[in-house]
Amino acid sequence: MANNPSLMEFMAQSQRGLNQSVYGPQFLQKQTYFTVDTSTNIFNTTYGRKVWHALNNQTRFFNALPRVVWGQTAGWRIRADRGDQRSRPVTETGALPTVDISDIQVVSSLPRTIATTFGATVKSAFVAQLEGGVGDVLALENENAQLDHIKEIQTQLLSSSAMIASSGSSTTTVQGTTPAYASNFHVGDLVAHNDATDSAANDTSGLLVSAVASSTGTVTHASATAAIADGDVMFAVGRGGMTSIDDIVSIDGTAFAASGGVGIETNVYSGITYSDRTSGNWNAAGSVQHNSGVGRDLSLNLIDTAIQNIRQNGGDPKLIVLNHDQYFRMERLLASQQRYNGQEDYQVGVGNERTFPGTRTGLVLSTYQGIPILPDADVPGSMTAADAELGSNIYVLDTDFLEIAVAQPTQYMENRDYFAANALVVRGLLYTLGELRCKNFITQAKIIDLNA
């Protein structure tokens, strides 16, 4: 009997672990469902939780922001004006102040879906487990998809709002000489253009992005009303995925590049297009310090101004986010202020992350004026009108008014229905439902047009 295993013993040995063999789960049952093991939800519990755990343990901008349950809301209200002359001194027999009401603005926010797919053929899953194979090819693809899913959410949160067009652009494509800038836009985004010759914004209702080739720097979208010329600015007016911090910390009319004397950043927030986000308005950032698309060195005055503006607007900066190039520049600026022979290394908690080990005296930065500094390699940068890449931006944020609202943490689904796929393939899906929300725009700031 040992040399002639029963059918059940053979099948048990073939499984080689839960849901890892080519047979699939419960292979003798009719496949009438699309999620694996719906009774125990084991794949959602295991793989979905694993991705969500990875998201919350990456040293990334995502991890520094507060996360909240979405709740029973599709938006909220912001008081934009307290009313005119409703409060004033009154003499003994004087008239009462004029009755006025607050100016209440409505902000709409709906969750966005980010999905990542993967798959493997039945044949590849079998062959990969033979001698010389990679092992469980489906598990390998699952692991890679998890990393891709994490990266996609991260890049959406730190996508730049605009890019400069170069020669080779047309009515349906924007070509950038810096390919990486195409990755700041995603399929489903709505974009508009600013003409560098007359500073006129075109297609402000938004053109749908259908393809992005980050390797060539090409963004394909619906046909524009006018040809896109070298030096024109393409900017987001709506996002298909999560709103980026650059979308939130923006002022309409800020000079993005020197060409034409003006550029337009973005009017987007949670898919709602505003006609006016000029400086000082309720939906504009507290401070956007630019240099008309001309690079300049970082100075402590720039950072101090951003902090001052936030505090004057009633906020209190909780986080400075920058890329490693500005991190090292900031460290060199503060190194001259070192006045102590000893170093007391310490770290500061930022959400579920911690800053680099640093000292209170300026060397190997951890904080500046008590504000934690979080370097992130995905922080976007600026460009000149000649398509030259400048250094990364710096964001000074009051995270009390920023949050990632989560409607559904990362879920995992698997499909082994060969008839539905019309092929002998196993397919997997990871998806997350949420959105970046800001409840006070004027307590956020950024510094752009910096040298690398």
Image (cartoon, grey):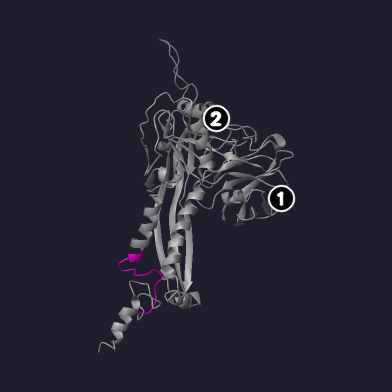
**Taking 373 as reference, is 406 above or below it?**
below
Question: Which residue in the protein does label 1 denote?
Answer: 225
Look at the numbered disc 1 and give the secondary structure of its residue: loop
Query: Overall secondary structure of the magenta stretch?
Result: loop
**In which quadrant of the rendered view does residue 297 lie?**
top right
Residue at image location 51% in from the left, 36% down from the top:
328
The kind of residue tagged 2 is: Gly
Residue 212 seen in the figure: yes
Q: Nearer the viewer, residue 308 or 74?
A: 308
**Marks 1 and 2, the one that precedes in the sequence:** 1
Few, some or many residues within 10 Å of mark 1 (<14, 14–19, 20+) = few
Q: Nearer the viewer, residue 419 or 375?
A: 375
Quadrant of the drawing holding the C terminus: top right
Q: Which residues are magenta?
A: 29-43
Residue 423's disc is none
Q: What is the x, y in percent for residue 181?
A: 60, 48
Question: Which residue in the protein does label 2 denote?
Answer: 280
**Taking 62 as reference, is 290 above or below it?**
above
Dots 1 and 2: beta carbons under 8 Å? no
Look at the numbered disc 2 and give the secondary structure of its residue: loop
Q: Nearer the viewer, residue 340 or 386?
A: 340
Whole-angstrom CA distance, mark 1 to mark 2, is 31 Å
Residue 204 seen in the figure: no
The kind of residue tagged 1 is: Thr
Q: Nearer the viewer, residue 246 or 141?
A: 141
